[in-house]
């Protein structure tokens, strides 16, 4: 299983790590075991404290880095979007799957560091917001991308039709109380954006109120990032043709009937209105602190790779290390050894 | 990744499935494609609705079935328990790991069926209660066993020192509100049993009150099972020697310091009192509706395999199928096709 172990026990890899760490801190890589290595900068040479090596397998297959390839550019028009494309990726599907597995190892290691930081009082967290129409593959992202890391480090929340209690509050109330605590990767399967998507399309709130929400959401997310909950927003886009195939499969296979509801057909019939609503979201809430990434989702393997890349990148940006002991390690060892006598 | 797909697309396997389904229902296996096959009992022959084939890989390596090998027998004494044993298992570590991966596939498939049932209004759930001292490997079980299934189907809760709010309620209050909803596998990392373990050892409640709790917990669990939340209780037991090694490692490795706290040494010094408290738990709360399984945990690979076996067995007992459509499938297909024109 990919997630079992991210830390390498291969001594060759470890010295690569140390070299990389040294390179990063602007120092020459030292020969392992040299006097210099043992004295100065021992931490950087300590594999346990070295940065996690980045996933390089098949990195050359991203002609354009994922953030750049998937970000929203000026003049972006969702109606012209090619949901079957694999922007920036030049590798094969098999290469994408190999890279996803490698990213899983890195994600697992970074997630453990984040979790450790949280346990030591750290408040930093990452929040992955997943939006997309029925069959766009939101559940698959949770299963195949988030499923690569330790469940203990994940805080997952799905947002459906608001309950009566939720409706009696401001629309951000249920979002606010579902935020990940420090040390966790939060995952929203649908989110605050439903309140400017389905709510707009179906006219579930006065237009004036909806119009005010975009900026309100921007400010809400700004506050999140200010308190160190880093937001990664992905919109999965499936083409009407592919959606047809996926819904057809849900109807043809008795083991998929439970995934289908007649409501899916009603939503599907409103695709142009949903496209417009998504267009507004991408235009108005694509902020510097919480930018959108638009993921072509006709190829599930590409969508999973793309989201994994973006999530791992967000984790890398945190420069996670292991928290220092808040106790006297030598004294603790002595006490433990004394107990064992 | 092990969890990607449990459903086989190998036609040979599918006909085995059908044969097994037929065998289970006491009917002769039919030749695929025969008139009889197409008419009567078509559902059993439909691979999508056939029971999940049980994991048979290396099954012969369990000389005694896991429930029997790990259950609490009359006269059980925790002080004589061999935490390094692998009761019932005659295979190698490598065989155990292969079997764990196979169990992961089956667990993943069964979990999806349970989830589907929950989405269709079903209330059934499974609750895995994990108890064990520091370093016994509770977190590893979550990571390596629970981590094999879709995070969407899991409801995980860790119980630490009660918060002020929790303390202001009955000790079962926080348990009650953390129960898994229908369709989920709930996981408790520590549980209601802390209120007769640490609370007993440290005298945090009047003895009379603690004494009443065992029966109270039994009745609480009885009510759970009555409303179809099936309880699987595992006590991981690590030997003092192995615990010493694991704590030593946490102190020696800077990337493990965060897992250590000075409190661990205090708890370790009270091992005899904890053994007594565990003994009472196993004697008094080993009910027919929620029996205990005692897992020797010095070998992590064995503990993980053992818990996976018990969890999968609990899921098998539910005889999970796919929920029937609550809509007219033919009409829905026609509507979908009409939209696509």
Image (tube, coloured by chain):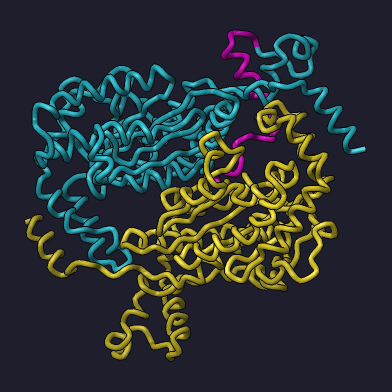
Chain colours: A yellow, B cyan
For residue B21: magenta?
yes
Q: How far across and how far down the image is residue A233, in percent? A: 61, 59
- At a point 23% along the width and 67% down the height, the residue shown is A326
Membership of A143 in magenta stretch: no
Q: Residue at x 55, y 32 (%)?
A: B115
Image height of B97 relative to B43, above or below: below
* Nearer the observer, A319 or B162: B162
Q: Residue at x 69, y 17 (%)?
A: B43
Q: Position of residue A40 (x, y in %)?
A: 30, 88
Q: Is there any visible trace of residue B50 in the rendered image?
A: yes
Q: Which quadrant is the C terminus of chain B positioned in?
A: top right
At 40% from the left and 66% from the top, the residue drawn is A9
Please state if A239 lies on the left or on the right of A117 as rendered: right
Q: Nearer the viewer, residue B17 or A133?
A: A133
Q: Quadrant of residue B225?
A: top left
Q: Please state the extent of the stretch shown in magenta in the rendering.
A: B1-28
Residue closer to the observer: A289 or A146: A289
Vertical arrangement, residue A74 with respect to residue B335, above or below: below
Is residue B321 toward the left or the right of residue B211 in the image?
Answer: right
């Amino acid at each position: 299983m990919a997630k079992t172990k991210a830390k390498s026990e291969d001594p060759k890899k470890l010295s690569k790590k140390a070299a990389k760490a040294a390179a990063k801190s602007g120092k020459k890589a030292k020969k392992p075991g040299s006097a210099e290595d043992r004295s100065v900068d021992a931490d950087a040479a300590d594999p346990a404290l070295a940065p996690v090596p980045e996933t390089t397998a098949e990195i050359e297959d991203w002609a354009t880095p994922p953030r750049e390839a998937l970000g929203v550019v000026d003049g972006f028009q969702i109606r012209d979007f090619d949901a079957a494309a694999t922007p920036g990726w030049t590798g094969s599907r098999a290469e994408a799957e190999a890279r996803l597995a490698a990213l899983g190892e890195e994600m697992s290691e970074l997630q453990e560091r984040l979790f450790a930081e949280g346990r030591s009082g750290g408040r930093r967290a990452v929040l992955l917001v997943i939006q997309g129409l029925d069959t766009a593959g939101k559940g698959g992202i949770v299963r195949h991308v988030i499923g690569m890391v330790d469940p203990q480090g994940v805080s997952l929340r799905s947002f459906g039709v608001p309950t009566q209690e939720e409706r009696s509050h401001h629309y951000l109330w249920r979002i606010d109380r579902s935020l990940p605590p420090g040390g966790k990767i939060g995952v929203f399967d649908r989110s605050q954006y439903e309140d400017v998507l389905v709510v707009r399309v179906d006219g579930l709130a006065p237009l004036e109120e909806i119009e005010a929400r975009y900026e309100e959401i921007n400010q809400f997310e700004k506050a999140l990032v200010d308190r160190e909950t880093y937001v990664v927003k992905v919109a999965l886009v499936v083409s009407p043709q592919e959606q047809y195939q996926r819904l057809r499969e849900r109807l043809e296979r008795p083991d998929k009937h439970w995934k289908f509801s007649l409501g899916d057909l009603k939503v599907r019939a409103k695709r142009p209105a949903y496209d417009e609503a998504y267009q507004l979201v991408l235009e108005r809430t694509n902020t510097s602190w919480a930018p959108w990434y638009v993921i072509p989702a006709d190829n599930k393997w590409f969508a999973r790779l793309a989201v994994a890349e973006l999530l791992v990148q967000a984790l890398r940006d945190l420069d996670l290390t292991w928290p220092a002991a808040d106790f006297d390690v030598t004294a603790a060892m002595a006490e433990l050894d004394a107990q064992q006598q």
